[in-house]
Amino acid sequence: MNDPFFHPVSGFDLPRFAGIPTFMRLPHVAPGDPRRAEVQIGLVGIPWDSGTTNRPGPRHGPRQMRDASTMIRAQNGATGVRPFELVNCADLGDVGPNPADIADSMERITAFYDDLRRAGIVPLSAGGDHLSTLPVLRALARDAPLGMIHFDSHTDLYKDYFDGTQYTHGTPFRRAVEEGLLDPKRVVQIGIRGTAYDNEDRDFAEAVGIRVIPIEEFHARTPEDVMAEAREIAGDGATYVSYDIDFVDPAFAPGTGTPEVGGPNSYQALLVARLLTGVDIVGADLVEVSPPFDASGATAYLGVSIMFEMLCNMARGLAGR
Ligand code: MN
Ligand code: MN
């Protein structure tokens, strides 16, 4: 058993609505805290949405998800995994972005995650819009390109927006491939759907060898079958998991900027994250929760529930089980 300092506050001891909400009621370990050296999985907020091209709001995501995450308990109801006892988890706080300067914000985010990488802390992040994944990958892929399992209704592989703008939440993975941060042959994108501008993003995916599993194929197969293929594509190598909440049908996750109908339900959304077993996850994120469009709070709650499923697999991997 690990140090109880790293165990979340139980609802048996303090009601869930009481206290200061950290991610999953874990201890807050701020930069400079000597306890930071013992942290194995760090939960981080990236309250930044300056890459958003349409409806904004994910800058408010981390705070809303911290509040919703007080609903998360210590044990996975389906698998019995108790992640907080397998490894030391902590809320490391937020990356402080510069909402008025995209380049400066990306540098700040990369610096924060460089620090985590040097400290050997595996990050599980709450966005933020999907551009926030790019500066994270810049830090985590310093040694070698990563594989990626990507849940989304969009490829986020577009070349540019507005006649040449490189950095938006529709372009992060195009940049990541160009910058050599991802090994496209070890990348799979699951859930792609909706109307499109054209086929430019999909043509790029095909040209570089990214496997796209569109929603028609997802629904025609079982989640188990799809995730077996995803695990095979990622292989044994270091893999990043990026989960855009708009992967989920907007009936279950309306609080997001670019919803697309016809998606998975909330059960399937949890199941695919649960089926990341055995993947060497070197970082993961849950992005695009937009509280201004999340009137019921259900989207944030689903988001943190998905984060918990990812965390269980990350903890199992680090603990060697
Ligand atoms: Mn996305
Ligand atoms: Mn999306």
Image (cartoon, grey):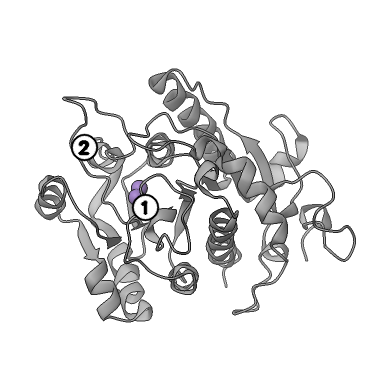
The residue where tag 2 is placed is 178
Is the distance from the Cβ of mark 2 to the nearest ligand 1 atom less than 8 Å?
no
Instruction: Judge whether residue 244 can be spotted in this image.
Output: no
Residue 35 lies, with reference to residue 318, above or below; the image says above
Q: Residues within 10 Å of mark 1 (few under 14, many from 20)?
A: many
Q: Quadrant of residue 50?
A: top left
Residue 280 lies, with reference to residue 216, above or below; the image says above
Instruction: Judge whether residue 58 can be spotted in this image.
Output: yes
Question: Which of these two is toward me, 204 or 240?
Answer: 204
Q: What label does residue 259 carry, if any?
A: 1
Q: Can you give x and y, in whole percent of width and height, for residue 93 in the image?
A: 66, 37
Q: Residue at x 53, y 41 (%)?
A: 292
| Quadrant of image for the N terminus | bottom right
Q: Quadrant of residue 308?
A: bottom right
Q: Can you give x and y, in whole percent of width and height, for residue 178 in the image?
A: 21, 37
Q: Are marks 1 and 2 in contact (CB under 8 Å)?
A: no
| Quadrant of image for the C terminus | bottom right
> Label 2's element?
helix
The amino acid type of the residue labelled 1 equals Pro
> Label 1's element?
loop
Q: Can you give x and y, in whole percent of width and height, for residue 262 in the image?
A: 31, 66
The amino acid type of the residue labelled 2 equals Glu
State left or right for residue 235 relative to residue 66: left
N-terminal of the pair, mark 1 or mark 2, is: 2
State left or right for residue 124 relative to residue 245: right
- Total labels: the figure holds 2
